Image (cartoon, grey):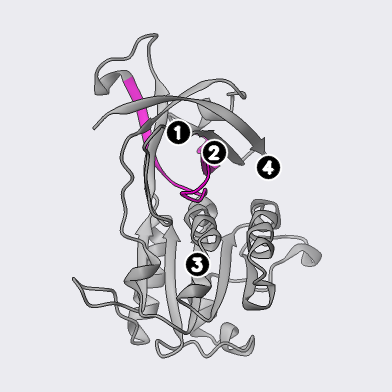
Amino acid sequence: MALHAVKIVSLAQHNERLMFLSVQKPTGFVYRPGQFVRLGIGLCDHPQSEDDYLMRPYSLASHPSEEVLSFYIARVIDGELTPKLFSMNIGDELYVDDTAYGMMLPERLEPAGTLMCFGSGSGLSAFLSIVKDNPWQRFDNVVVVHCARTRDDISLTKEFEKAVKAQHREVNFRFIAATTREPNPAKRGEITKRVPEAIQEGDFTAMGFDFSPKWVRAMICGNPAFVDSMKKTLKSMGFTAPRGQTLGTFVAENFW
């Protein structure tokens, strides 16, 4: 395993908690939509050993065909790395691993039906890469559900709309905001409770979805509590995870 020095080529802070940044893609770097890679900083002028770096795993939001690696990052107030990332500028140096990891891949799901991608916070990142990769070749429709506390934390909508429009799939795509603590009624999402509860209480059925493993393929990415709750809910409804060569009806991955 090797680390590559890369420059920040674009950076947008959506608010004080969320940012979208892109870095140079190292020569020969390959990955699959849905995977993650370690990104971080050097702790000294000429880092040599693993202890000289501060690295964390982040899902890739870019498509493998792009010349950059992009990331949707949430600031952890008392974190070691993210406060430093939020103080950086275009041209500053970061480091990335030479290898991508992760098995949250659309091809591990049974084909056809509606692909529903559930992301909490910056766990949405991997789904942008997947949507850019024409998932309609495998699934009939694609739905992205972004789960956050407030509307201001749902800031990647336009990136998804741009990716969908580029593939002329507007009629086969839907973006659903789920807000749990939005105080302004006018800004609340279509879902206003925790998503596992919304599934159990029929909110998605009321929207017109036949929420069963016969018709839905689910992908889940986010904080561990969110992922565990979603997995428990889906398993109780008959959804199954892939095992070996056997395809499943849901896949999940924690982002820490």
| Vertical order, 96 against 246 (above or below) | above
Q: Nearer the observer, disc 3 or disc 1?
A: 3
Q: Distance between the residues labelled 3 and 4?
A: 21 Å
* Residue 56 part of the magenta-drawn span: yes
Q: How far apart are marks 2 and 3 (CA)?
A: 20 Å
Q: Distance between the residues labelled 2 and 4?
A: 11 Å
Kind of residue at disc 2: Arg
Residue under numbered circle 4: 14
Using the rendered view, name the quadrant where residue 8 is placed. top right
Q: Distance between the residues labelled 1 and 4?
A: 19 Å
Kind of residue at disc 1: Gly
**The magenta segment:** 53-79
Residue under numbered circle 3: 118
Q: Are marks 2 and 1 in contact (CB under 8 Å)?
A: yes
Mark carried by residue 214: none
Residue at point 26%, 73% (across, down): 242
N-term mark: 3 or 1: 1
Q: Quadrant of the N terminus?
A: top left
Residue under numbered circle 1: 79
Instruction: State the image coordinates of residue 130 (x, y, percent, origin top left).
Output: 49, 61
